[in-house]
Image (tube, rainbow, N blue to C red):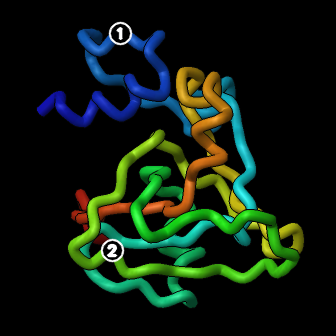
Amino acid sequence: ERRWLRFPCHFRPDLDDCAPPTAVAAKDFLGPLPRARLPLSRIRFALLHGRLEVEEVEAAFTGSLVALCRMEGVAPPASEGTAAEIRTCDLGESVPRSLALAFVHSFDLARGEVSVILSAADAAEPSRLAEVAVVARGEVAWEPYSVR
């Protein structure tokens, strides 16, 4: 039951994972964490299982935990383009290498960027962010606790 704590503790190692769970507002939990902006021209978005349509990316990724990955055959362009185009890729049988975990905060299509929140440890190695070619997320199962 406590295995879900591995994600909050990755981002906030200052939390006591043995303490009883308590509610914390997202702004209080994520507020002190470092942020990064990834240019849309350098990355692609993918689901670990299944296909992803370009029109679904912003809704499917905003507010989600994702893996920032490097993957054989999918390299960031040598130079950043000017288009704020969202691109996807199909992972198929490929195995991306996770460089960092991140929380997707927002998309800024006018600037051509996606804003992510990182752990302090991941933000301390900015060279890894330059290697990111794929932003991948897994399946999300949602079960409501009550129906009104």
For label 2, the residue is 91
Mark 2 closeness class: few <14, some 14–19, many ≥20 residues within 10 Å:
some
Tell me what residue is drawn at x 45 percent, y 79 percent: 89
Q: Is residue 22 above or below residue 103?
A: above
Tell me what residue is drawn at x 62 percent, y 63 percent: 76
- Please state if 93 lies on the left or on the right of 107 as rendered: left
Q: Is residue 18 visible?
A: yes
For label 1, the residue is 16
Comparing labels 1 and 2, the label whose residue is closer to the camera: 2
Q: Is residue 35 above or below residue 103?
A: above
Closer to the camera in the image, 75 or 123: 75
Tell me what residue is drawn at x 50 percent, y 61 percent: 135
Q: Amino acid at mark 1?
A: Asp
Quadrant of the frame with the C terminus: bottom left
Tell me what residue is drawn at x 82 percent, y 81 percent: 83
Circle 1: element type: loop
Q: Amino acid at mark 2?
A: Leu
On the image, which quarter does residue 43 sit in?
A: bottom right
Closer to the camera in the image, 35 or 80: 80
**How far apart are the alpha carbons under marks 1 and 2?**
36 Å
Indicate the position of residue 53 as horizontal and vertical percent values. Answer: 47, 89
Mark 1 closeness class: few <14, some 14–19, many ≥20 residues within 10 Å:
few
Dot label at residue 113: none
Closer to the camera in the image, 143 or 40: 40
